[in-house]
Image: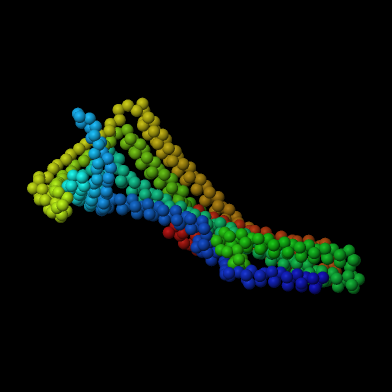
Amino acid sequence: MLNIFRLLALSILLLGLVPLTMGQEVYMLDLETSILLAKEKSIRMQMLQQGHNVALHNLKAAVSQNRTQVFLDMTVPQYTETIKQWEDSTGISFYPVRQNQLAGYFTISQPLPTDGSLYIRSGAQSFVDFYADDRNTQINSSIGLRQPIEAFFGFNNNRMNLNQAKLAYELSMKQLKREELNLVYEISQDYFTLLSVQERMNIARLSLEKQQEAYDIAQSKYKAGLIREVEALQMEVDLSAATNNYDMAIVDFSAQVRTFKQNLGISLHDSVVVSSDLTYQPVLVDVEKAVKLAMSNRPELRENEIAIEIQEMTVRRQRAQGLPSGNIQLNYNFIGVGKDPRSIPIGGTFDQTWQNLTSRPGSFGVGLTASIPIIDWGANRAKVQSAISTLKRNKLQMQESQVTIERDIRTQVDRLHSSLRRLQLLEKNVSVAEKSFEISRQRYANGEIDSQSMALERERLNNAYNTRLDAYINYKLLLSDIMRKTFFDFEKGQAMAE
């Protein structure tokens, strides 16, 4: 039986070496390095980062829209050959058209804080009529103002779009940080689950070693005629059970390692070595400080505030739909025209056009277009009331979120302190169980107790190890949960919000 156990141990060792041989990389991981690796390689974090980039670029676009814009429009060239219709008192006639157009216009536009824009536009164009054999040219330069009249009623579309872009960017920053801390918590869960499975495998190995030792003692006592055959057979059954438990623990550990690799975002062919350090630092969290930090840093509350601000903009936008709308347009133009036979070079025609522009007085234009709602049977008023109801609901949601967050933080802090006390108590239980098992082992070797009592002591020791492990993992997860809910690492005494 001892040779069988040695062969099994050698097989397990070779099984453990296979990933190191086939793996592309070897990762030596503790909790912090696991978290850093997940932040770097996790597909979910990469997707969240791209969402943040979308908001960042939208903000840049909204800011850029309020800066000077320069455009160049060109037609180089546009050739047209078709048949057109002419209708007069003598009837309908058709005539061929063959033309070529060249044009270029340069525009400078400056958005104004009033939601309007001031622009300067200059350009020239040339029309060549091949059938009439002439060329028409025009030079145009103008300065103008466009101003929406709804801006005078308190609705500034440009300013509102900019504010919404800023809020969306801030929201994406909050969401990114929240998801980052959620990832930290989830990786912590995965890490401690893997650590738990690894430690249970070690406990199963220790149990197997102790059972092997008990089996060897039983065989010696049986051969010496000190115990009955049934006790020796029972020890063999217990050894088989311990061997099977260890084998199943190895399988569970391998499966959990693969899950951990996937969640980290690394290849399944890579190898990981997890630190088995189970030391901890007792942390007492000030519940009032934790509540205050949560109220200051929780993105849900800021998200509610942003939703309220955006909804207030929606209310103003909807109210503006029921107010007069339109545009005021002012412009001052300088125009020059010219016409020459096609045989004359285009430069000469434009010289004539420029002289015409300088001799022609400028022309002034002003216009007002307006759309005034008169009867809509209360449709817009109903939409405004709907938007106001949504705004009130958002405010109530914020109040509910504040109460929920405070209740949750106080509960988690109480659980943390209770978990710490339980962990400290169970550590003493482990020490007592180890001493008790060692005493029982000596008593069994001396023939003072039977194999059944020895099995009970071994089971009691395994339970002590497992319950202490569960308490340790629960304590560390509660610390991680409080960190993600307050944006503050109480274990290290540093903020996580920045």
Which quadrant holds the N terminus?
bottom right
**In this orientation, which residue lies closer to the viewer: 339 or 248?**
339
Residue 52, position in %: x, y? Answer: 43, 54
**In this orientation, which residue lies closer to the viewer: 38 or 269?**
269
Relative to 88, residue 414 above or below? below
Q: Please indicate, yes or no, whether residue 141 appears anywhere in the rendered image.
A: no
Hey, which quadrant is residue 460 in on the image?
Answer: bottom right
Residue sitting farthest toward the right: 225
Q: Please indicate, yes or no, whether residue 159 appears anywhere in the rendered image.
A: yes
Residue 428, position in %: x, y? Answer: 67, 63
- Compared across the picture, whether 368 is left or right of 63 comes to left
Relative to 377, residue 307 above or below? below
Hey, which quadrant is residue 94 in on the image?
Answer: top left
- Compared across the picture, whether 423 is left or right of 354 comes to right
Which quadrant holds the C terminus?
bottom left
Residue at (30, 46) in percent of width and height: 158
Residue 97, position in %: x, y? Answer: 24, 43
**In this orientation, which residue lies closer to the viewer: 347 or 286?**
347
- Compared across the picture, whether 173 is left or right of 449 comes to left
Which scheme is used to colour this image of the protein? rainbow
Residue 334, position in %: x, y? Answer: 14, 47
- Compared across the picture, whether 214 is left or right of 423 comes to right
**In this orientation, which residue lies closer to the viewer: 234 or 281?**
234
Residue at (39, 41) in percent of width and height: 311
Residue at (59, 62) in percent of width and height: 261
Relative to 437, residue 388 above or below? above
